[in-house]
Image (tube, rainbow, N blue to C red):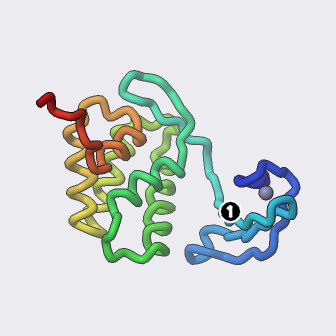
Amino acid sequence: MRCPFCGNVDTQVKDSRPAEDHVAIRRRRFCPACAGRFTTYERVQLRDLVVIKKNQKREPFDRDKLERSIRIALQKRPIEPERVDQMISGIVRRLESLGDADIPSDKIGEIVMETLARIDTVAYVRFASVYKNFQAADDFEDFVSELRPPEPGPEEPA
Ligand SMILES: [Zn+2]
């Protein structure tokens, strides 16, 4: 596993233990080149999912993107990080068991909303208001940027 700090490929596993109720293995890694420490998770991947975006473009499903958009919706909400991990794993399991490896992006949005609705109303409303107002919901990165506070606009002319 390549070191995310210095790019060295020769990193060491210091510790491996089950996480998320044995759904994942958490490995703590150390980079001898820069002394950097980082953590990786190993998970079962039942199938390679492909997201079909609104513009019909295909891209490999990216769990990290999904996780970022959900974590932003859950910002400052009283939900245990472990619970969030379990929730994301649950969403991925559902996607994997849909019967088709090609998944429309709005199907993913629906499943995320259903799941958030059961866990935290505020996070659900945050996610849903962005999702539903966003006609070309073709990318979770777009959700993420919509969920951020707006950048200050250009100065008004005097
Ligand atoms: Zn390094």
Residue to which mark 1 is pinned: 40
In the image shown, does 10 or 90 lie closer to the viewer?
A: 10
Where is residue 67 drawn, in percent x and y?
47, 55
Numbered disc total: 1
Residue found at x 45% / y 37%: 103
| 24 displayed left or right of 147 | right
Where is residue 41 drawn, in percent x and y?
66, 63
Which quarter of the frame holds ligand 1? bottom right
Q: Amino acid at mark 1?
A: Thr
The N terminus lies in which quarter of the figure? Answer: bottom right
Residue found at x 37% / y 38%: 142
Where is residue 33 drawn, in percent x and y?
86, 59
The residue carrying pointer 1 sits among few (fewer than 14), some (14 to 19) or many (20 or more) residues within 10 Å by Cα, namely some
In the image shown, does 90 or 32 lie closer to the viewer?
A: 32
Q: Quadrant of residue 55?
A: top left
Residue found at x 65% / y 60%: 43
Residue found at x 37% / y 57%: 72
Q: Outermost residue toward the left? A: 158
Q: Is mark 1 within 8 Å of ligand 1?
A: no
Where is residue 6 drawn, in percent x and y?
77, 51
In the image shown, does 87 or 2 lie closer to the viewer?
A: 2
The C terminus lies in which quarter of the figure? Answer: top left
Q: Outermost residue toward the front? A: 158
- Is 11 above or below relative to 60? below
| 99 displayed left or right of 136 | right
| 122 displayed left or right of 46 | left
Query: In what element is the residue under mark 1?
Result: strand
